[in-house]
Image (tube, coloured by chain):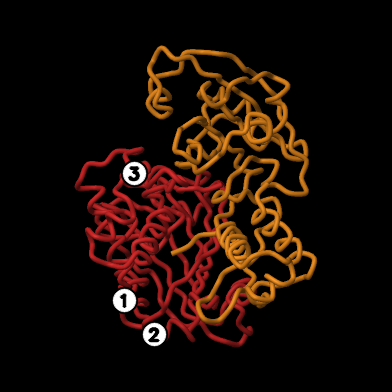
Chain colours: A red, B orange
Amino acid sequence: MLKYEQIAQQLNQYIVEGNFQAGDKLPSVEALKSKYNVSKSTIIKALEALEKKGNIYQARGSGIYVRNQKREGYLNLFSSSGFSDEIEGSHVTNKVLRVEEVLPPKDVCQKLKLSHDTSVYVLERIVYVDGAVLCFEQSYFNKDIVLYLNESIAENSVFKYLEQNLKVKIGFSDIYFAVDKLKSQEAEKLELSNGDPCLRYEQIFYTTTGIPFDCSNLLYHYQNAHFYIPSQK
Amino acid sequence: MLKYEQIAQQLNQYIVEGNFQAGDKLPSVEALKSKYNVSKSTIIKALEALEKKGNIYQARGSGIYVRNQKREGYLNLFSSSGFSDEIEGSHVTNKVLRVEEVLPPKDVCQKLKLSHDTSVYVLERIVYVDGAVLCFEQSYFNKDIVLYLNESIAENSVFKYLEQNLKVKIGFSDIYFAVDKLKSQEAEKLELSNGDPCLRYEQIFYTTTGIPFDCSNLLYHYQNAHFYIPSQK
């Protein structure tokens, strides 16, 4: 973890433990610089990271203020780094249905910018939060980046494995979604009924250098999934 | 419009008209500085704005690259500045059902940080894209910021009116949503059936100085609304 990420984490802890409310003013950059004994640029980068995550806002010429905390159990779609990180305080488990090497469908080839004869890993699993179905996930991984994958890895956080073991630098992602009705096979996976509502959700993840490495299709359970976006103009 | 916003707009036009594809490299900051004849800091701010909107990404030490264009007709939830801006190329119309001054419900008081005896504007309208229902919108506006509102204003973009006429500086917003089934009265408004899927969507807008001024509840039509989020780690 980089220095500014550590400071961002400590600052966030300071906000949570200090019982700061939305609209409360934080100490100035200068004061935070002394408090954490780091450079001004580290403080600024830490604040930018917290601003992106929706924890704080900076009003020009006025100061740094605390933003609304996201509601408990809500997935933050703006800074998505895997379910485990996002649903704090909850117990996330995965039931892996399938991990194998396959030739990807045509649309996945295009999205991962791979030729049609390049094999990829496909992962299918059901994600549970505190024992309740959150979603069914089908992910295709570019093997140039995701060098190895198996069932026991997929039972835990794939993204933690990618970052910590394979040293993948996860950059940005494109999310597309719409509401729809479940087909009967899909409904079974989510323990729901044919025709029940769902969120059809597609996410393509890129490395920091812009290589698409994960093309995922998710089906969210309409009663168990709630979403939050700290949006900006 | 500030200088860097103008440059961001011109840069975006340059990307679109130049037929840049996702992954294509843009000229360096120095080259853009000369091209647009502005300061380096203006270019950097323009690039940051485009990065936030999901138009480009900057790979450290490597350069500036074009990101995926959002799909046509998709609403960008990260930088939300009203429907008209977001659904480019489409014709957005509103049918206003109600504009009046009311005492707000308790939860709205809390979200707008108003005392229970402070009146607010309530607006109810149906938003259409190319004649098809996009959503039903119910918004409560803090009258300290939204000084005046009437039906003919609400038939057009309220946010353009706020920015251009009332000089409101729109800052950030909190979005919360979940999928649900429509109740019969709601279904009527969306021209759908009782029990059909929908997206229940709440958004609280703040000024740049952190004053909550708009607390909106939206119900999105499940077949006509598609969403995009340029997400970051």
**Residue B39 position in % (x across, y down):** 64, 65
- In terms of sequence position, does the residue under pointer 1 or pointer 2 come before the other? 2
Could you give the CA–CA distance between mark 1 and mark 2, rounded to whole angstroms? 9 Å
Q: Kindly identify the amino acid type of the residue bearing the numbered disc 1.
A: Ile
Instruction: Name the side, left or right, on which B225 lies relative to B212.
Output: right
Q: Which mark is residue A153?
A: 1
**Residue B89 position in % (x across, y down):** 78, 49
Q: Which mark is residue A178?
A: none
Quarter of the image where the C terminus of chain B is located: bottom left
Q: Please name the residue shown 55% across and 55% down the image.
A: B229
Query: Which residue is the site of mark 3?
Result: A69
Instruction: Name the side, left or right, on which B11 lies relative to B147.
Output: right
Could you give the CA–CA distance between mark 3 and mark 2, rounded to whole angstroms? 37 Å
Q: Nearer the viewer, residue B161 or A107?
A: B161
- In terms of sequence position, does the residue under pointer 1 or pointer 3 come before the other? 3
Q: Kindly identify the amino acid type of the residue bearing the numbered disc 2.
A: Tyr
Name the element at disc 1. Answer: helix
Mark 1–mark 2 contact, CB under 8 Å? yes
- Crowd class of label 1 (few under 14; some 14 to 19; many from 20; radius 10 Å): some
Residue B40 seen in the figure: yes
Q: Please name the residue shown 69% across and 71% down the image.
A: B32
- Crowd class of label 2 (few under 14; some 14 to 19; many from 20; radius 10 Å): few
- Crowd class of label 3 (few under 14; some 14 to 19; many from 20; radius 10 Å): some
- In terms of sequence position, does the residue under pointer 3 or pointer 2 come before the other? 3
Query: Which residue is the site of mark 2?
Result: A148
Q: What is the chain letter for disc 2?
A: A
Q: What is the chain letter for disc 3?
A: A
Name the element at disc 2. Answer: loop
Instruction: Name the side, left or right, on which B135 lies relative to B212.
Output: right
**Residue A210 position in % (x across, y down):** 55, 75
Determine the image quadrant of residue B35.
bottom right
Comparing marks 1 and 3, which lies closer to the viewer? 3
